[in-house]
Image (cartoon, coloured by chain):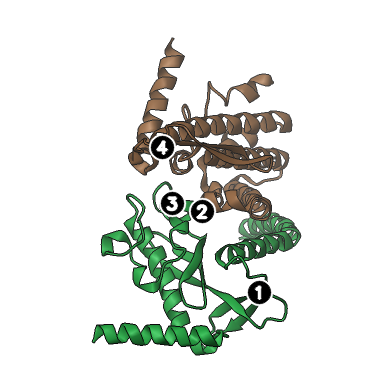
Chain colours: A green, B brown
């Protein structure tokens, strides 16, 4: 019994020293890590927004999704683009993607923020050529080529391609469903409404 | 004394001769840059844990030496993970889960148990450095072979010094042999490397 207590105490001393050391390193690196995460998100936001967006704002939808709004100038009167983050489970990980759209709901660009798909296959969703093809697409085109859409999927990684495409589609759909909450320019709003009426009439 | 350093590189190479740490070897060596990044993380953890284990070897009771060694190793791995996330976010994203998994890389516990817990500080540091470098060389070479054949590219760089640069080695029309960057390709490449090492040491 005495022996066990002694061993336990010795082990505790070692783990306590290790714990203190790690606590120290953690507090030292924490601001730097947060800074890196902020930078990565900021950079992603700028890359998916239309070029003329210079000032950014955040609004929160009723379901607590955060939507970033890009404005041309500091008066923030004219919204030129929106962005939001979507997430979907892919082949082996949650894929997080930042999606940027114009006020008429066509895509300006996407950026995969984090993923842990198969190295050499699914990880190619971060490649430039894959992400760039989303620019200019509308929601009807958001399907991979194997499903009859306009997104060229990665060879051998259809699941990851579908995941990204699906996540992007979900974000666009959510923004469309909540378009009353977005500060849309009025004439564009009318245009969207006409377009939708047009589509609806075509369906009839 | 110098022998303690050089033995890990060829004669007792941790991957090719001791056959330790094969899981990270197979999983990470999909590109040359990943191999270098993982190797450097292992060199740091292995050298530091060898140093500490050798320092405390006389005060550690025999019966609880393994949990104490693991505590030392896990602490250094956590340090590496935090520093990587803060300073080389790209590499940290690429290596992902494999950095925390250095804790269970048997090279490190193996060297603590077989070498550092029995020897002085200086030989232990040299042993850690040598073994780490031997591990890095194998990962880099395997990564190079697998990436060139499996993706047709070569990604080289050195964490924190110069960023990864991807060169298209095989040209645009090359159809990549995807299997080489998947697990079966890892085993095949490792098999060829083991065979080459045997050929070399025979002659």
Image quarter in which the N terminus of chain B is found:
top right
Where the C terminus of chain B falls, by quadrant? top left
Q: Chain of mark 3?
A: A
Identify the subunit bearing mark 1: A
| Marks 4, 2: nearer the viewer | 4
| Label 2 vs label 3, nearer the camera | 3
Q: Which mark is residue A72?
A: 1
Both marks 4 and 3 on one chain = no
Residue highlighted by disc 2: B97
Q: Nearer the viewer, residue A169 or A81?
A: A81
Q: Nearer the viewer, residue B135 or B178?
A: B178
Front tag of 4 and 3: 4
Same-chain status of marks 1 and 4: no
From the top left corner, tell me how far across and down residue B65 is, in percent: 61, 46
Determine whether label 1 and label 4 are within 8 Å by CB.
no
Q: Position of residue A69 (x, y in %)?
A: 60, 77
Q: For the residues tagged 1 and 2, is the chain the same?
A: no
Distance, label 4 to label 3, CA atoms, is 16 Å
SS of the residue at dot 2?
A: helix
Residue holding disc 3: A124
Q: Could you tell me how far apart the alpha carbons at marks 1 and 2 are, in whole angstroms? A: 41 Å
Label 4 SS: loop
Marks 2, 3 in one chain: no
Q: Are marks 4 and 2 in contact (CB under 8 Å)?
A: no
Q: Is residue A47 visible?
A: yes
Q: Which residue is mark 4?
A: B172
Question: Label 2 to label 3, Cα distance in Å?
Answer: 18 Å
Looking at the image, is mark 1 or mark 2 nearer the viewer?
1
| Residue B16: image tag | none
Q: Secondary structure beneath disc 3?
A: helix
Residue at mark 4: chain: B
């Amino acid at each position: 019994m005495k022996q066990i207590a002694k061993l336990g105490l010795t082990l505790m001393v070692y783990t306590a020293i290790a714990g203190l050391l790690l606590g120290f390193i953690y507090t030292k690196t924490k601001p730097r890590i947060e800074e890196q995460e902020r930078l990565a998100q900021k950079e992603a936001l700028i890359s998916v927004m239309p070029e003329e967006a210079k000032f950014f704002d955040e609004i929160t939808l009723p379901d607590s999704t955060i939507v970033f709004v890009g404005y041309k100038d500091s008066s923030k009167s004219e919204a030129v683009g929106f962005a939001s983050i979507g997430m979907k489970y892919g082949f082996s990980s949650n894929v997080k993607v930042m999606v940027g759209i114009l006020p008429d709901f066509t895509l300006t660009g996407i950026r995969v923020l984090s993923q842990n798909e198969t190295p050499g296959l699914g990880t190619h969703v971060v490649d430039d050529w894959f992400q760039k093809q989303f620019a200019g697409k509308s929601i009807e085109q958001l399907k991979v080529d194997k499903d009859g859409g306009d997104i060229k999927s990665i060879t051998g990684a259809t699941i990851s391609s579908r995941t990204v495409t699906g996540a992007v589609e979900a974000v666009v759909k959510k923004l469309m469903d909540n378009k009353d909450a977005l500060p849309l320019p009025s004439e564009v709003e009318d245009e969207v409404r006409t377009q939708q009426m047009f589509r609806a009439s075509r369906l009839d | 004394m110098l022998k303690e350093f050089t033995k890990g590189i060829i004669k007792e190479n941790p991957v090719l001769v001791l056959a330790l740490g094969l899981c990270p070897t197979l999983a990470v060596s999909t590109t040359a840059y990943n191999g270098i990044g993982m190797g450097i993380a292992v060199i740091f953890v292995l050298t530091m844990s060898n140093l500490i284990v050798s320092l405390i070897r006389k005060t550690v009771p025999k019966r609880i030496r393994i949990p104490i060694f693991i505590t030392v190793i896990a602490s250094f791995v956590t340090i590496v993970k935090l520093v990587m996330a803060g300073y080389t976010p790209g590499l940290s994203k690429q290596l992902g889960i494999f950095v925390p998994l250095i804790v269970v890389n048997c090279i490190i516990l193996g060297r603590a148990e077989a070498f550092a817990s029995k020897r002085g500080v200086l030989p232990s540091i040299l042993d850690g450095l040598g073994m780490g470098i031997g591990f890095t060389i194998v990962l880099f070479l395997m990564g190079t072979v697998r990436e060139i054949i499996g993706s047709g590219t070569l990604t080289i760089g050195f964490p924190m010094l110069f960023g990864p640069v991807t060169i298209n080695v095989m040209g645009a029309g090359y159809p990549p042999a995807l299997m080489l960057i998947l697990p079966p390709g890892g085993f095949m490449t490792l098999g060829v490397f083991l065979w080459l090492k045997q050929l070399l040491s025979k002659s």
